[in-house]
């Protein structure tokens, strides 16, 4: 059974058991368990996972519901859970979120079930990449499982780089210089895009900009005008000004029609390869290659950013805990989905190996992609936290309109800081600098 869920839809979900909340023995007071259908919420991308599981497990009764996946920090899930908590029914059993910060509110709301307190075996949990499930931890308890790692890398058109005699940049200084060469020698071609809400996660995070340093359960340190922030903002301003850095969203019809075929380089997450170049742009095979994220010259600690990755949560109210944990385990670890179908680099190590082998055997990419992706998976800078507020929503409301109006990102850094502070305080955070 497949249902659509969104702002324009009203959905009645069967009650998943009365009561039931985090707490009690093993961290979970179980709701009365039944054999009713398992209700799973997914975004459109993860719909394939739920459908595949249903095909492979025909005896499991399922209600598959599509929603926005909390894309761009919509907070749809939190809003619905708040409603379900008031009426004491309606909670889904399992939910996918494109955000990595759901635990920041879901534990306090009593929605997320503790997974490492007897629900999922330690042998399974130990199979995830080091640090992959850090966003899911609260006070030593695991409340979600990471779907995929979204480490940033440098995607580039290998054929054009060879044809024009350009060298793939290893540093951000070389990247900026190449952007200036492209502006002069090949106007109209792009070396990146700063038009999406996740722009700060690609560039500012990779530059170790301390805009989002979560220092406690309700504490954040914000510094958007340090050298680490201004150097990247200045780089983006330079390339935006010479038109080698797009200010259109890579998912917009305008970009797809007018700019997708003129990409020389594009810093972005691991899922850009399958989701964007293969899926959206339909870029022919043999063109796209991948390199490590550029680094600042002299920086002894290489760093990368991260865009999404997504998490799976099990409801503490679920009346179908066995079915829910079986699905949760399968969807995050099974090679049939993560290794063969998933568009992004799996968080589960064995599935990641299968995924990389599958990417290589597809012969879509030019050269080796496994090395750079594996390297950057261990370089995601840990100083960018997972607060309750959405950095994507803040950037979209504060920086993007300014850039559209012709302002520089450097000039907008103080306003970005103030906006982050305001959002954080509204969620009860103590703000420091």
Image (cartoon, helix red, strand yellow):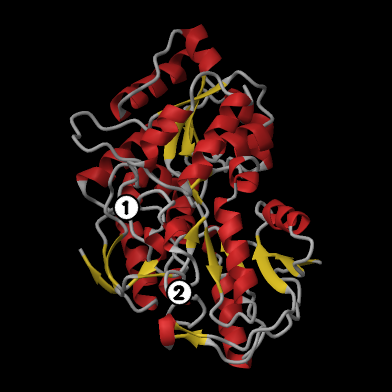
Task: Where is residue 58? Give x, y as percent.
Answer: 79, 61
Residue pictured at 55% horizontal, 88% vertical: 20
Q: With respect to residue 211, does 154 lie above or below? A: above
Q: Nearer the viewer, residue 116 or 364?
A: 116
What residue occupies the far right of the structure in this picture?
A: 1
Residue pictured at 65% horizontal, 70% vertical: 323
Q: Quadrant of residue 122?
A: bottom left
Task: Where is residue 275? Give x, y as percent.
Answer: 62, 40
Residue to which mark 2 is pinned: 114
Please say whether residue 213 is visible from this viewpoint.
yes
Residue to which mark 1 is pinned: 413
Helix, strand or loop at mark 1: helix
Q: Nearer the viewer, residue 416 or 25?
A: 25
For disc 2, the neighbor class at 10 Å (few under 14, some 14 to 19, many from 20) is: many
Q: State how far apart marks 2 and 1 are (Cα).
A: 38 Å
Task: Where is residue 119? Give x, y as percent.
Answer: 50, 71
Task: Where is residue 211? Give x, y as percent.
Answer: 30, 56
2 or 1: mark nearer the eye: 2
Residue pictured at 42% horizontal, 81% vertical: 26
Q: Nearer the viewer, residue 218 or 313?
A: 313
Q: Is residue 19 left or right of residue 38?
A: left
């Amino acid at each position: 059974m497949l249902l659509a869920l969104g702002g324009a839809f009203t959905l009645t979900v069967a009650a998943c058991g009365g009561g039931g909340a985090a707490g009690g023995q093993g961290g979970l007071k179980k709701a009365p368990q039944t054999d009713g259908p398992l209700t799973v919420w997914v975004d459109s991308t993860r719909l394939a996972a739920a459908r595949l599981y249903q095909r492979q497990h025909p005896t499991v009764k399922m209600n598959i519901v599509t929603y926005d996946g909390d894309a761009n920090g919509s907070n749809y899930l939190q809003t619905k859970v708040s409603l379900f908590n008031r009426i004491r029914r309606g909670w889904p059993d399992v939910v996918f979120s494109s955000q990595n910060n759901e635990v920041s509110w879901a534990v306090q709301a009593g929605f997320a079930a503790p997974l490492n307190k007897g629900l999922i075996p330690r042998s399974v949990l130990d199979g995830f990449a080091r640090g992959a499930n850090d966003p899911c931890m609260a006070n030593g308890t695991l409340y979600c499982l990471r779907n995929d790692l979204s480490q940033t890398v440098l995607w580039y058109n290998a054929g054009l780089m060879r044809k024009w005699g350009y060298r793939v940049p290893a540093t951000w200084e070389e990247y900026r210089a190449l952007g200036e060469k492209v502006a002069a020698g090949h106007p109209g071609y792009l070396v990146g895009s700063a038009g999406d809400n996740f722009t700060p996660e690609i560039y500012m995070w990779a530059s170790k900009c301390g805009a989002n340093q979560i220092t406690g359960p309700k504490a954040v340190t914000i510094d958007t005008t340090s050298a680490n922030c201004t150097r990247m903002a200045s780089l983006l301003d330079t390339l935006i000004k010479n038109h080698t850095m797009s200010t259109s969203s890579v998912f917009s019809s305008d970009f797809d029609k007018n700019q997708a075929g003129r990409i020389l380089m594009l810093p972005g997450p691991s899922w850009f390869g399958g989701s964007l170049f293969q899926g959206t742009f339909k870029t022919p095979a043999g063109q796209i290659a991948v390199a490590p994220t550029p680094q600042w010259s002299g920086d002894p600690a290489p760093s990368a950013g991260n865009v999404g990755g997504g998490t799976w949560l099990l409801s503490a109210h679920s009346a179908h805990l066995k079915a829910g944990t079986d699905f949760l385990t399968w969807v995050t670890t099974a090679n049939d989905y993560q290794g063969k179908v998933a568009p992004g680099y799996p968080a589960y190590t064995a599935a990641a190996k299968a995924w990389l082998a599958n990417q290589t055997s597809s012969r879509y990419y030019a050269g080796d992609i496994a090395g750079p992706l594996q390297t950057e998976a261990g370089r995601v800078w840990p100083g960018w936290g997972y607060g309750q507020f959405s950095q994507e929503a803040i950037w979209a409301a504060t920086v993007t309109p300014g850039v559209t109006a012709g302002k520089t990102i450097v000039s907008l850094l103080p306003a970005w800081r103030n906006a982050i502070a305001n959002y954080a305080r509204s969620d009860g955070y103590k703000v420091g600098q």
